[in-house]
Amino acid sequence: MKTLIIYKSYHKLNNEKIAKVMEEAMNAKLVKVEDVKLEDLEKYDLIGFGSGIYASKFHKKIYKLIGKMPSMNKNVFIFCTSASGRFGEKDLIKEKLSEKGCKVIGEFNCCAEFRPLGLKLGEMGHPEAKDLEDARIFGKGLLNL
């Protein structure tokens, strides 16, 4: 199964850590959202969208990419890292993908370290080894659907 993983990560690069583990587990192509070529999306059987959670939402660049995507009948998955360990407004990203004809077949989230202005929010040291192993298992599991 030809898989593409699109992600946005900055600050502590928490989401990038998860994306790289999934890339390896799924033998996928990993691309930062800024580097995605819309014409390449048709080449993939499965597409992942990952982001840190910012103000309860995926990064605005992920939404912008989805808005520009052509309609396509694709299986997709979503993943995120957040200070709370929660998904934020996952229904919004799922709705946007559904509007493009995509079917969300999996969701993954884990806690991430986040320290704005030196304040401690989230779990220090996350994503940790267990989070990375959970991401690996999640990715491999998608290949069997």
Image (cartoon, helix red, strand yellow):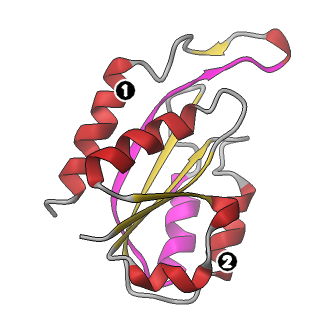
Counting every numbered tag in the picture gives: 2
Res 39 quadrant in image: bottom right
Residue 118 x, y percent position in the rendering? 81, 10
Residue 127 versus residue 53 in the image, above or below: above
Residue 17 versus residue 62 in the image, above or below: above
Q: Is residue 44 magenta?
A: no
How far apart marks 1 and 2 lie (CA) works out to: 30 Å
Quadrant in the picture for the C terminus: bottom left
Mark 2 lies on a secondary structure that is helix
Q: Is residue 104 magenta?
A: yes
Q: Which residue is mark 2?
A: 67
Residue 119 x, y percent position in the rendering? 78, 10
Other residues around mark 2 within 10 Å, as few (<14) / some (14–19) / many (≥20): some
User: Which residue is rendered at x = 52% and y = 59% of the image?
Assistant: 91
Q: Residue furthest left?
A: 144
Res 105 quadrant in image: bottom left
User: Which residue is rendered at x = 33% and y = 45% of the image?
Assistant: 24
Of residue 117 and residue 15, the one placed in the foreground of this image is 15
Query: Hey, what amino acid is under mark 1?
Result: Asp
Q: Residue furthest right?
A: 117
Query: Hey, what amino acid is under mark 2?
Result: Gly
Q: Which residue is mark 1?
A: 131
Q: Which stretch is magenta?
A: 90-116
Other residues around mark 1 within 10 Å, as few (<14) / some (14–19) / many (≥20): some
